Image (tube, rainbow, N blue to C red):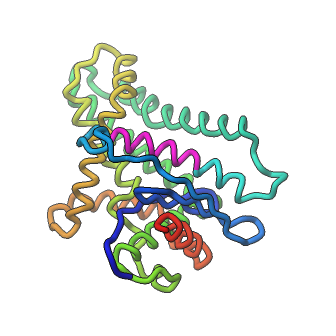
Amino acid sequence: MSGKTIVVGGQAVIEGVMMRSPKKYAISVRGPDGKITTKIEKIKNNESFWHKTPILRGIFKFAETLVVGVKAINYSANAAVEEDEQLSNKELVGTIIGSFAINIVLFIIAPLLVTNLLADKSNTVLFNIVDGIIRLVFFVIFLLLISLMKDIKRLFQYHGAEHMAVNCYEQKKKLTVENVKKCSRLHPRCGTTFLLIVMCLSILIFSVIPTINLFVRFLSRLVLIPIVAGISYEILKFTAAHVENPLIKLIIFPGLSLQRLTTRIPDGSQIEVSIDALKKSLS
């Protein structure tokens, strides 16, 4: 491959991959009949002031990623199964709301409650360090447990296929199954790395914010999610652009290591799906 490399990203979905370029995103799914079906959507102009201003662009990017991600999951949930097994809109909405609720309980409320029992509440810095460590431990345990599920293992394989296809493209190699198989399943711009940055950064930010009680601590975490996400986006963007720097390599090492939990080596058919999505997002 030759020419200018466009920045692309993606997401594993149910039996498929979503790939996103600056102008469009493509969701490719392997259906129950073995055929690949694809949905392509154009992305609205993202050259506004909000998309160019540091931190603000990260907040908007985070919101857009959530919206596109939900749409991709919705599409794949029905495209990957027989017609009589497809979920209704109400069921899809219920599943999404339930997932968000579980995440809030597992990664905000539960760590706060445990920390409230273990740490000195009067020491804001210590409290938030303990809270951050517990949240990270919960996250790793959660990943380890869900990786034992057959469906999640396949999702992680598609996650690996997504990274490998993007790496192949960024190395300017022809997008073939054989070439993609030779590429790494780890990528510096991965959402897993982003989440790790968010968790570490939140410790620093929350430590300098005085809080009155447990409920206020909980509210502050919810309210500040966009700010933390915006700053984390800038950190991820910077580190991904300087991956050859020895210091940056050291900084991104934990994130890449965590990706070994959220990705698996895909088979050829899964790689085909990721290539299909990538090509169509770039077309």
Residue 226: image quadrant is top left
Residue drawn at point x = 73 percent, y = 72 percent: 34
Residue 167 sits above or below residue 213 on the image: below
Residue 279 x, y percent position in the rendering: 50, 71
Quadrant the N terminus occupies: bottom left
- Residue visible at 54% across and 36% down in the picture: 100
Horizontal side of residue 24 vs 122, given as left or right: right
The residue sitting at 60% across, 39% down in the picture is: 96
In the image, residue 149 lies at what x, y percent? 62, 57
Which residue is at 28% across, 39% downward? Answer: 49
Name the one closer to the observer, 29 or 153.
29
Q: Is residue 196 above or below residue 113?
A: below
Indicate the position of residue 182 as horizontal and vertical percent values.
Answer: 43, 82
Region rendered in magenta: 58-71
Location of residue 21 in the rendering, given as x and y in whole percent from the top left corner: 43, 60
In this rendering, does residue 149 appear at all?
Answer: no
Does the stretch in magenta take in 70? Answer: yes
What secondary structure characterizes most of the magenta part? Answer: helix
In this view, the residue farthest toward the bottom is: 178
In the displayed structure, 177 sits above or below 75; it is below
The magenta stretch spans residue 178: no
Whether residue 89 appears in this view of the structure is: yes
In this orientation, which residue lies closer to the viewer: 136 or 208? 208
